[in-house]
Image (tube, helix red, strand yellow):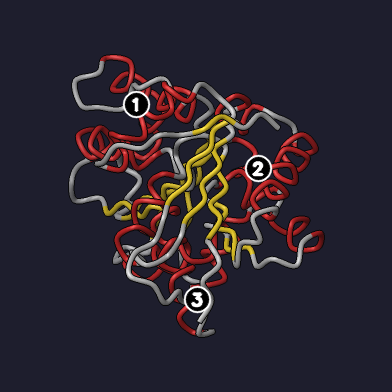
Amino acid sequence: MDNRAIGVLDSGIGGLTSAKVLEEILPREDIIYFGDSRRMPYGGHTKEEIREMSVQGAAFLDSFNVKAILLACGTISTNAADMLRDRFKTPFIGVVDAACAAAARVTRTKKIGVIATPPSIASGVYERGLTGCRGDLTVITHACANFAGMVEQGHFRVGDALAEREVGRELKCFLGSGIDTLLLGCTHYPLLSEVIAQYLGAEIRQISAGVEAARALADYLTGRDMLADRAAGRRLWYTSGDPHTFGHTADIFLGHHIVPEQKIL
């Protein structure tokens, strides 16, 4: 038993997809979320900048003496997870391994598409992770530079002209490719899932890196007898951006009202 809180670190609001899963499967856990919306999208920064910002966010969460930190951001997971594990004693769970395992498990055609931010795609970790799970896979990757920022601005619904135009422009490379599975390697991207399904077809299986990471964290805590023993967990929500804007969007993500606080690092 471990009643300390779980930390969730994200570059903005995308990690709320992970937080929602944690609320559903681990209702007794305290959750402390930090989204660095003021400096997002992290995909537009250099690797050195991403690593420095990630250290600052992790240090803020670690100051609460959390028992584990979920890196609910593909860009952080692919560019800074190794450094964070070296600098902090707190366990970090990233989005890559669990997502790759899930995608490799469900594909039938053995052809998997991956979309993520430019730094995540450039790192090559998704290709390595997928082929490490199964050596017979064909992996097609594509960097989507504008998706995260677009989602942060509220453009992610079917019928939104900007969202539909950008999805069509970015994902046309997958038309006729033979993929049957699309790995969403940025935690912002699940909000675009309906627009993506409308464009690529509902038969393409979408794997959310953030959702799979949340499940992996639950398995990690369960296997080490680190689950909390209380009736219900509490939630603390922090953003480096505007709390009102963050809270409004978070209500849509989570399906319930929150009152975030601002923390500028």
Q: What whole-number distance in Å separates the C-alpha atoms at marks 1 and 2?
A: 33 Å
Q: What whole-number distance in Å separates the C-alpha atoms at marks 3 and 2?
A: 31 Å
Estimate the x, y position of residue 188 in percent, counting from the top left.
43, 38
Bin the neighbour count of mark 3 within 10 Å (Cα to Cα): few under 14, some 14-19, many 20 and up.
Answer: some
Residue reaching furthest top?
A: 161
Report helix, strand or loop for mark 3. helix
Tag 2 or tag 3, which sits nearer the N-term?
2
> What's the residue type where badge 1 is placed?
His
Q: Indicate left or right for 193 with 50 as reference.
A: left
Tag 3 or tag 1, which sits nearer the N-term?
3
Bin the neighbour count of mark 1 within 10 Å (Cα to Cα): few under 14, some 14-19, many 20 and up.
Answer: some
Estimate the x, y position of residue 45 in percent, counting from the top left.
69, 29
User: Which disc is residue 192 wearing?
Assistant: none
Estimate the x, y position of residue 101 in percent, counting from the top left.
45, 69
User: Which disc is residue 248 wearing?
Assistant: 1
Q: Nearer the viewer, residue 157 or 19?
A: 19
Is label 3 or label 2 in front?
3
Check disc 3 and report the residue beneath it: 221
Query: Residue at position x 53%, y 52% from top?
Result: 8
Is label 1 or label 2 in front?
1
Check disc 2 and report the residue beneath it: 122
> What's the residue type where badge 2 is placed?
Ala
Q: Nearer the viewer, residue 38 or 208?
A: 38
Query: Residue at position x 29%, y 55% from top?
Result: 180
> What's the residue type where badge 3 is placed?
Leu
> Would you place residue 218 above or below residue 162 in this image?
below
